[in-house]
Image (spheres, rainbow, N blue to C red):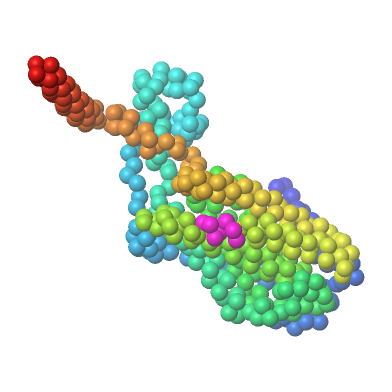
Amino acid sequence: MFHFFLLHLCLRKMELLPDLWKEDFWLPPGVTWRDMEQLADSDRPRPQDLLIALPLALGFVALRYVFERFFAPPMARCLGVKNRLKVTATPSPKLESFYTQRSRQPTQSDIVNLMLLCGKTQRQIETWFRRRRNQDRPCQTKKFGEAAPFMHFHLLGLLLYFFLSSSLQRSWFWDHRDCWRQYPVQPMERAHYWYYMLELGFYGSLLLRISVDIKRKDFKEQVIHHLATIFLLSFSYCANYVRIGTLVMLLHDSSDILLESAKMFNYGAGWRKTCDTLFVVFAVVFLVTRLVIFPSKIIHTTLVLSMEVFEPFAGYYFFNILLMVLQALHIFWAGLILRMVCKFLKGKLEKDERSDEESEVEEDEEDKGGEENKDQGGDCYWEKSKDSLNSRLSMLTNSCVLNNLTNHRSSVVDRMRKAQ
């Protein structure tokens, strides 16, 4: 019975499949798929071309694995990237079960219950959870290995696009009204085709690796961004919005290169000035491209100027809604960047605002190192305390002796003066 139900469901989907490519959804009123057939097969986008994005996504996943395994470590050593030493938590099945199944940061009532369950003090339980969270914290090499391929992809994508394409010589690159003239009979260059396929494959690989990549504070926003980008690229390609879609990708890649480059140098030792310079340039480029050019040029073009050529339709609203979603994410990330800029001007910038809770570890891990040393080795801690106490006592003794000698000398001089 179940097999008959699946067969019936598949037949219903096959009947609805032609409605998915209904012209009213994808094309403006009065435009049909046959209008695009006036172009040669090599000059027009076809929906079946998007199928190549899946093997490209798998290829990017394999390429990233090879890069992180063989190329990222030597690059990290050249830039002086070093991993911090981590103190592993002592094995405790009960605490481990609570950590993996319930919460990584127990509340005060949870700690009280765990004290009764495990027979440990509050300090020992807090230390155990702090060390356990620190074990899951991604190391600097892993962060570097994630940022480096992103930077190289955006850089190579832009270089290949500008070398293979003559878009800078096209009128629509500067005059955005030309993005809609003679639509849909607009030939597509091969550089645009490969640029689209590579971008789709790249963002598809990000979704495939989302479970193993570092989870940052803006994890949900990143997932929304990737999905919106994939839908935006797919729709713009099928509907032959290639010109405006190319402009959107160029705006995003221009600032992403600087962001990933700043991350790479931030993880290295002795590259603080380079990282700060790249961060300042990135902040300026991001704010200008995402908050000024994107809404005033791109969204204005798709929302207003396109209406000079055709009337609104379903795809028009779908396309602009996706652009609005991207703009909302731009505003969210601009807020984080401005917070970092304020800290940078005050000289308090130490890390990326997106990364303060990459693995939900406490920020004061380093500040509490002394307390961990107490639990880790009592003898070593008391030896250091005794040495520091002895040194302070000796300094105090010396100062007292010097003060006594000075007072005694002054009193002797006063007596001699009176005797004279």
Q: Residue furthest front?
A: 420
Q: Is 287 on the left-hand or right-hand side of 263?
A: right
Q: Residue at x 32, y 32 (%)?
A: 370
Q: Is residue 283 magenta?
A: yes
Along the viewing direction, whichever of 89 and 395 lies nearer the viewer:
395
Highlighted magenta segment, given as a residue range: 279-285
Relative horizontal placement of residue 230, taking residue 202 as reference (left or right): right
Q: Is residue 302 depicted above or below 167 in this figure?
A: above
Give the residue drawn at x 46%, y 30%.
98
Q: Name the residue located 66 percent from the left edge and 50 percent from the top edge.
A: 331
Q: Position of residue 129 (x, y in %)?
A: 41, 32
Please tell me whether the stretch drawn in magenta is mainly helix, strand or loop: helix
Residue 213 shows in this picture: yes
Please say whether residue 35 is one of the residues in the magenta stretch: no
Residue 166 percent coordinates (x, y):
65, 81
Number of marks drawn = 0
The quadrant in which the C terminus is found is top left
220 vs 262: above or below? above
Q: Position of residue 8 (x, y in %)?
A: 77, 54
* Residue 14 in view, yes or no: no
Whether residue 93 is situated above or below residue 349 in the rendered picture = above
**Residue that appears at 59% across and 64% down:** 253
Q: Which corner quadrant of the image does residue 250 belong to? A: bottom right
Q: Position of residue 29 (x, y in %)?
A: 89, 67
State the residue in front, 33 or 235.
235
Horizontal relation, residue 249 to residue 117: left or right: right
